[in-house]
């Protein structure tokens, strides 16, 4: 699914009207109908609903929704139209006239001073002040209205985007001056701003409403931002053929674990096996041999010369994928070993956890990363590698720059994990749940991605497929075990079921 900027959205709206031979007001009615149906499904006709409409097309949407709710028997609808400039957009003016044709409505047009209505926790506010066409932060009276809504305690439904929030970057926006929605009803395509953690308090729950926008124009519209969904992943997955053996599905080598952290190597190894690799070898501290061989008997074990941590990272056999990092620690000898690995590794490579912390201690190693290396940092690891970032917007911009500069793939972990490619394309993952915020979940992600590398998938695809399936496995585990009760081992255990669910 594409994430398209405001200019692109406007062009798609125009193309939809042209191709379907409808007027812009008919498209507005279609959008308002979708919003009205959603509101009707959530609130009874006795609910008090206060509509705040602006002078543009977002305000036109809000006026149309108000009219439709009244027509459906909602008798406690109060409407405030803010027309301080004395000029409404063409479609907003048309919706205003249609609303005025209804007798007995509770309507106020605000042209100068505004006396706010009482709002309480039992009320619903429909926010239609400003939509995706906003090009500057709110000021003056609109800031006062926004803050009044936010402080009221009312349940807020924003149409398309909370008023005051830009659809893309908001680094210069004071979020206090943005409407804080509990529910944002967006039209067909998500906004880039929906995927940044600092915006969550103003967006709340968001839901996409299909209004039959022109698919051809959507496909033609260029963007670097996408949401990963099953439709993208299913065509990439290859079914297993009957006359095959374990070596047809690749051998993976894991440099993982140290004394006190052997569980990380176990989680990663289990995930590699569950995601379909034919063979997995764990290279770790000598003391870990019996632990790993007992916990993951399917895996082979290469003991390091070091008793408690890894001191060398040499590749002795032909492996189709190599992963390094879970639980290895950051001892000087381990850092030296990692530097040697980066200099000599020719197999596709995944770096996670302490491998990234080792590089942060010796930043010159960034220049040694082989092309298309996959790194999988969480926020803290990313900032240690590339410097402290002010917020998630800046972190994504930095990730895009670093991916291009070093020709690597960055899997930036979070609620919407993003897969950043050297081309500048960003893929946001929508699977997963808060139950996955548990020790070892990142090790499992490393294992799943490594498994697909071992099976011969290109690094760009392995990272995207692995990220999606990791989240889906977490969703399947949570559905059965609950978010509070699941562990990283459960995510690994459900990886095969996640693949089966997608591949059919």
Image: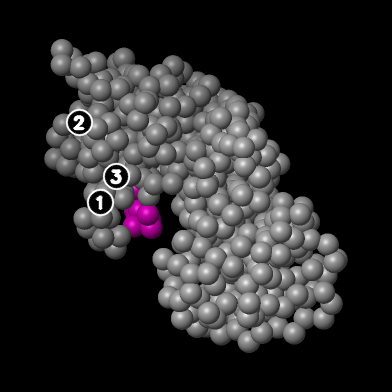
Q: Specify the label residue 441 is tagged with.
A: none
Q: Residue furthest top?
A: 243
Tell me which residue sits at (54%, 81%) in the image.
Answer: 76
Position of residue 342 measured from the top left corner of the image (x, y, whole percent): 48, 24
Q: Which mark is residue 477?
A: 1
Mark 2, other Cα within 10 Å: few <14 / some 14–19 / many ≥20 = many
- Residue that label 3 marks: 473
Q: In x, y percent, where is residue 347?
A: 40, 19
Tell me the magenta residue range: 433-441
Question: In screen coordinates, is 381 left or right of 95?
Answer: left
Outermost residue to the bottom: 118
Q: Position of residue 332 (x, y in %)?
A: 47, 38
Locate the C terminus and report the quarter of the image it occupies.
top left
Q: Residue at x 82, y 74 (%)?
A: 111
Residue at x-position 38% and y-position 58%: 434
Q: Secondary structure at mark 3?
A: helix
Q: CA distance from mark 3 to mark 2?
A: 21 Å
Quick check: can you spot residue 130? no
Q: Where, by quadrant of the figure, is residue 54 drawn?
A: bottom right
Binning the other alpha carbons within 10 Å of mark 3 as few (below 14), some (14 to 19) or many (20 upward) gives many
Residue at coordinates 53% horizontally, 79% vertically from top-left? Answer: 75
Does dot 2 land on a helix, a strand or a loop? loop
| Horizontal side of residue 33 vs 223, given as left or right | left
Numbered label attached to residue 299:
2
Callout 2–callout 1 Cβ contact below 8 Å: no
Q: Quadrant of residue 313?
A: top left
From this view, report whether residue 473 is shown above or below residue 374: below
Place residue 50 in its image quadrant.
bottom right
Local SS, label 1:
helix
């Amino acid at each position: 699914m594409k994430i398209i900027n405001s200019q692109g959205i406007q062009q798609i709206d125009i193309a939809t009207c042209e191709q379907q031979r409808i007027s812009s007001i008919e498209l507005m009615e279609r959008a308002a109908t979708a919003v009205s149906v959603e509101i009707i499904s959530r609130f009874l006709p006795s609910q008090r609903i206060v509509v705040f409409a602006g002078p543009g097309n977002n305000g036109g949407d809000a006026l149309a929704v108000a009219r439709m709710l009244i027509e459906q028997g909602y008798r406690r609808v109060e409407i405030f139209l803010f027309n301080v400039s004395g000029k409404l957009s063409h479609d907003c003016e048309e919706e205003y006239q249609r609303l005025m044709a209804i007798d007995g409505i509770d309507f106020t047009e605000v042209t100068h001073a505004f006396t706010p209505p009482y709002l309480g926790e039992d009320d619903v506010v429909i926010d239609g002040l400003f939509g995706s066409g906003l090009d500057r932060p709110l000021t003056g009276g609109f800031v006062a209205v926004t803050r009044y809504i936010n402080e009221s305690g009312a349940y807020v439904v924003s149409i398309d985007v909370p008023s005051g929030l830009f659809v893309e970057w908001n680094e210069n926006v004071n979020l206090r001056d943005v409407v804080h929605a509990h529910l944002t009803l967006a039209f067909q395509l998500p906004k880039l701003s929906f995927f940044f953690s600092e915006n969550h308090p103003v967006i709340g729950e968001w839901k996409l409403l299909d209004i039959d926008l022109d698919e051809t124009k959507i496909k033609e519209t260029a963007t670097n931002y996408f949401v990963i969904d099953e439709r993208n992943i299913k065509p990439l997955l290859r079914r297993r053929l009957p006359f095959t053996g374990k070596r047809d599905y690749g051998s993976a080598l894991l440099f993982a674990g140290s004394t006190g952290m052997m569980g990380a190597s176990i989680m990663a190894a289990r995930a590699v096996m569950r995601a379909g690799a034919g063979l997995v070898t764990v290279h770790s501290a000598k003391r870990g041999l019996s632990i790993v061989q007992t916990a993951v008997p399917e895996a082979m074990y290469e003991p390091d010369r070091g008793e408690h941590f890894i001191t060398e990272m040499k590749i002795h056999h032909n492996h189709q994928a190599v992963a390094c990092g879970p639980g290895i620690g950051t001892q000087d000898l381990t850092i030296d070993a990692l530097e040697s690995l980066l200099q000599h590794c020719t197999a596709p490579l995944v770096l996670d956890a302490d491998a990234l912390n080792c590089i942060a201690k010796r930043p010159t190693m960034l220049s040694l990363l082989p092309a298309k290396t996959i790194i999988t940092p969480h926020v803290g690891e990313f900032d240690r590698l590339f410097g402290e970032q002010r917020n998630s917007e800046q972190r994504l911009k930095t990730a895009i720059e670093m991916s291009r500069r070093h020709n690597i793939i960055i899997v930036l972990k979070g609620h919407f994990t993003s897969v950043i490619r050297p081309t500048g394309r960003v893929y946001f993952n929508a699977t997963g749940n808060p139950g996955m915020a548990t020790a070892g979940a990142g090790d499992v992600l490393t294992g799943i991605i490594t498994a697909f590398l071992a099976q011969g998938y290109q690094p760009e695809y392995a990272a995207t497929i692995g990220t999606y399936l990791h989240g889906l496995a977490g969703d399947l585990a949570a559905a059965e075990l609950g978010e509070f009760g699941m562990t990283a081992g459960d995510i690994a255990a459900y990886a095969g079921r996640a693949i089966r669910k997608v591949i059919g």
